[in-house]
Image: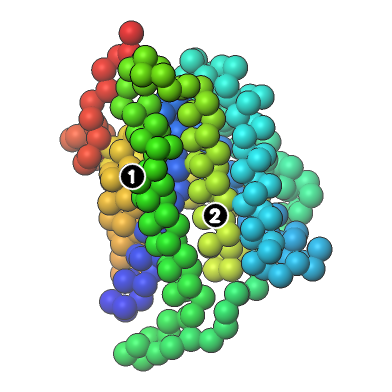
């Protein structure tokens, strides 16, 4: 059981880290609370299903096409629906909720509410202390770590990463230094949606598809972001694994734990808000002039 908890915690933590870091990126740069973030993850999963089952594409090609298409779709949504109201946070919040529900209803209309699945990229398993560890689980964890490492290199070792971090630190100063803040925000939105699409590609062989599959990851992602600190990349990474292992422990150790995992995440989020509102690694935001 301990090994089951470790495997489940690592996979869940990696998935939540990808989602939460993408969410934190666009919030840090543009102060956009994108509730539709996990809906893009859901759309990418359905695109992969459509490519593999309806068009006959190899799953890898289907995943690549889905990531590109969903990223472009996210940029179009940003330019049409978010950018015009970007300075009004309440309007952005309501707008992204509407976008998420619209995507859910469109997927429900096209694919119905039936549970669907995508075949594993790799079959078989290995046994560790009489516990089956599927090769697909190992591949999913490895791909998630690889994406996180590539994102770290992008943010820390490139000029684009410097521009993103500088804009997140202080938008006004970044503008004064000659950075095009609007352009940086749009690029960051593309990276954020791309991370959501990549998360869908990574996890889709291990999950079942449903038009409502974006809701539970949204709850966990918000809990991770609050726990780690809103806008903190480091906080999102650490918070994701904390909640990933907490969720795994509840599922495997508590009676009817599968029904309690969302409640545990929300309880942790409320406690953090009461005790340390800025989160583990966040800073207290002062009201912008």
| Residue at point 79%, 68% (across, down) | 56
Q: How is the image coloured?
A: rainbow
Q: Secondary structure at mark 2?
A: helix
The residue under label 2 is: 198
SS state under label 1: helix
Q: Is residue 250 left or right of residue 68?
A: left
Q: Which of the two discs, 1 and 2, labels the residue nearer the N terminus?
A: 1
Q: Is residue 15 above or below residue 269?
A: below
The answer to whether marks 1 and 2 mark residues whose Cβ atoms lie closer than 8 Å is no
Q: Is residue 174 visible?
A: yes
Quadrant assignment for the N terminus: bottom left
Left or right: residue 60 versus residue 215 is: right
Q: Nearer the viewer, residue 112 or 289?
A: 289
Q: Residues within 10 Å of mark 1 (few under 14, many from 20)?
A: some
In which quarter of the view is residue 254 placed? Answer: bottom left
**Residue 48: percent from the left, percent from the top?**
68, 59
Q: Residue furthest right?
A: 55
User: Whole-percent x and y of residue 264?
Assistant: 33, 51
- What residue is drawn where x is 65% and y is 45%? 70
Q: Residue at x 79, y 49 (%)?
A: 110
Residue 156 is tagged as: 1
- On screen, residue 86 versus residue 277, left or right, reads right
Residue 199 x/y as whole percent: 52, 55
Residue positioned 36% across, 72% down in the render: 7
Instruction: Tell me the mark number nearer the camera, choosing from 1 and 2.
Output: 1
Q: Is residue 45 left or right of residue 276?
A: right
Looking at this view, is 260 or 20 the one in front? 20
């Amino acid at each position: 059981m301990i090994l089951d908890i470790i495997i489940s915690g690592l996979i869940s933590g990696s998935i939540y880290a990808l989602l939460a870091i993408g969410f934190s990126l666009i919030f840090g740069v543009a102060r956009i609370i994108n509730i539709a973030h996990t809906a893009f993850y859901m759309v990418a999963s359905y695109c992969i299903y459509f490519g593999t089952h309806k068009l006959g594409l190899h799953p890898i090609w289907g995943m690549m096409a889905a990531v590109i298409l969903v990223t472009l779709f996210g940029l179009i949504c940003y330019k049409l629906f978010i950018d015009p109201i970007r300075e009004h946070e309440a309007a952005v919040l309501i707008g992204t909720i509407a976008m998420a529900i619209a995507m859910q209803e469109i997927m429900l209309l096209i694919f119905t509410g039936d549970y669907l699945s995508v075949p594993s990229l790799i079959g078989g398993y290995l046994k560790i202390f009489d516990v089956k560890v599927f090769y697909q689980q190992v591949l999913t964890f490895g791909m998630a770590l690889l994406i996180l490492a590539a994102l770290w290199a992008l943010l820390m070792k490139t000029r684009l990463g410097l521009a993103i971090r500088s804009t997140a630190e202080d938008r006004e100063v970044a503008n004064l230094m000659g950075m095009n803040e609007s352009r940086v925000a749009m690029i960051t939105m593309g990276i954020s949606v791309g991370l959501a699409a990549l998360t869908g590609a990574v996890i889709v062989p291990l999950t079942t598809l449903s038009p409502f599959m974006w809701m539970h990851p949204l709850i966990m992602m918000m809990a991770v972001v609050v726990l780690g600190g809103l806008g903190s990349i480091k906080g999102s990474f650490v918070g994701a694994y904390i909640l990933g292992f907490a969720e795994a422990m509840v599922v495997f150790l508590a009676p009817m734990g599968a029904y309690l995992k969302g409640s545990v995440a929300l309880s942790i989020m409320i406690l953090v808000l009461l005790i340390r509102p800025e989160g583990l690694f966040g800073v207290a935001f002062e009201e912008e002039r």
